[in-house]
Image: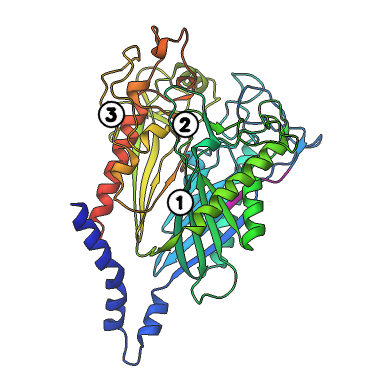
Amino acid sequence: MRLARIIRRGLATIAPLVALVLAAPEGTTASTAQEADALLVGFGKADITPEVGADAPTVFVAGYGQDRRATGVHDPIWSRAVVLRHRSQTIALVSVDLVGVQLELVESARTRLNDITYVLVSSTHNHEGPDVIGLWGPSPVVSGVDRAYLEQVEDGIVASVRSAEAALAPAVASYGTAEDEALLADSRDPVVKDGVLRVLRFDPAEGNGPPIGLLVQWNCHPENLGSQNTLITADFPKATVRTLEARHGCPVAYFTGAIGGLMSAAEDVLTRPDGTFYEEGDFAFADAYGVAIADLADRAIAGSSPIPLTPFAVSSVSVWLPLENPLYRLARAAGVLDRMGDRWTGDPYTPGRSLGRRNILGPLAVRTEVAGLRLGALHVAAIPGELYPELVAGRVEDPADPNADFPDAPIEPSVLDTLPDGPVLILGLANDEVGYIIPRRQWDREPPFAYGRDKAQYGEVNSIGPQAAPILLHALQRAVEQLEEIQE
């Protein structure tokens, strides 16, 4: 079956050009036909930094605990967009320096970009930017969201896409990877990491001048500044983007991948000039780590190969997740988690009646989205939360620890087993943030605890529930199956 896919994809790479030449008016050359079939790419950005000061609304910083109030701005935060166009189809890939924008905001931005075939908005999961979910306000029962700031974010998403669209130019692409698990720390057993950095480089089709831009995907929480920082910053991705832009003379968009688990920057690898290790809470650590990721990206670029990125196909699947986290249910009742809910029917694709924004009585589900994109030879998985790395490459424990809550649960289909063979991007926190996506057989809230521990590990407290992983990974399977049905 995979061989048949490869053959079909190879034929599809040349078929559009052949068809264009055969159907072109008399006098049209192969060269002009190829120009009409070109991949167009543009990069754009918009500043989404909140105003911080005595005359501005209080900015509650997302991540860690409640009531962390911003006292200033260290560096701007951005919405960065990469727009790709082929014939009549246009796809926008957007990354925002935020903890996790919600689906409703993404859908609102899409209504303003309704001439774009598909808009994907991924959050870096920055722990040093404004609260855009509600969980980090002045107390556990008061939201930290400023509605006016959400409008600013939406405006920034739209503006960055339009800016990238205005910069569209004929492009060729190359794809590369580089791996270094040593740059990641995993604070939860079992220790599993996705240490693969994936990069797309776009160059002018005519081969002259600097690159059009770089798209970098890496798998680490941007939280190098720690829980005591009160200055707005993009954390280490700021240094990654700045370094690569200076080296290559082009825009750079940074995207987050599988960061559940908890993937954070290793503190036993990078050293200061005096030989001591950098530590969390230091801006120098964020800078050094960001440069290290830029170095890894340059390794990927050095080993990259040309890749066709046309034609396009997109399959998005709406899916309902049961809201089982008791703290999230209470936060919903208090208006801290402000999103629509529906009655949970037991079928993730068939919701019951709408329950509005506050009702928590009985089985409850929230709608999210999983998507698969086929861009020529590249496949993209869009996952709406913090995916555990075990679910990327099929590294879920087998057998599971017998003290886990569901040790006999079926192992979820992995992302790489679901996607066709070949180049991939894995975009986490894509179009939504539903929390940690934990393999069901590693879920561990009730004693006795796995791995001989005397208390539960961190993770479940910030997950929507134990059914999230199987539902979302099966939804990805459905999206990919639908991609196979779309004519190339």
Q: In this view, does 354 lie to the left or right of 184?
A: left
Answer with mark 3 or mark 2, whichever residue precedes in sequence.
Answer: 2
| Of the pair 405 and 341, the residue shown nearer to us | 405
Q: Can residue 268 be seen in this view?
A: yes
Q: Which amino acid lies under the numbered mark 3 shown in the image of this protein?
A: Ile
* Residue at which label 1 appears: 177
The CA distance from mark 3 to mark 1 is 27 Å
Camera-nearest residue between 111 and 264? 264
Q: Earlier in the sequence, mark 2 or mark 1?
A: 1
| Quarter of the image where the C terminus is located | bottom left
* CA distance for labels 2 and 1: 20 Å
Q: Give the range drawn in magenta.
A: 75-80
Which element type, helix, strand or loop, lies under badge 3?
Answer: loop
- In the rendered view, tell whether residue 27 sits above or below residue 23: below
Q: Quadrant of residue 133?
A: top right
Q: Using the image as rendered, state which of residue 259 and residue 323 is in the foreground.
A: 259
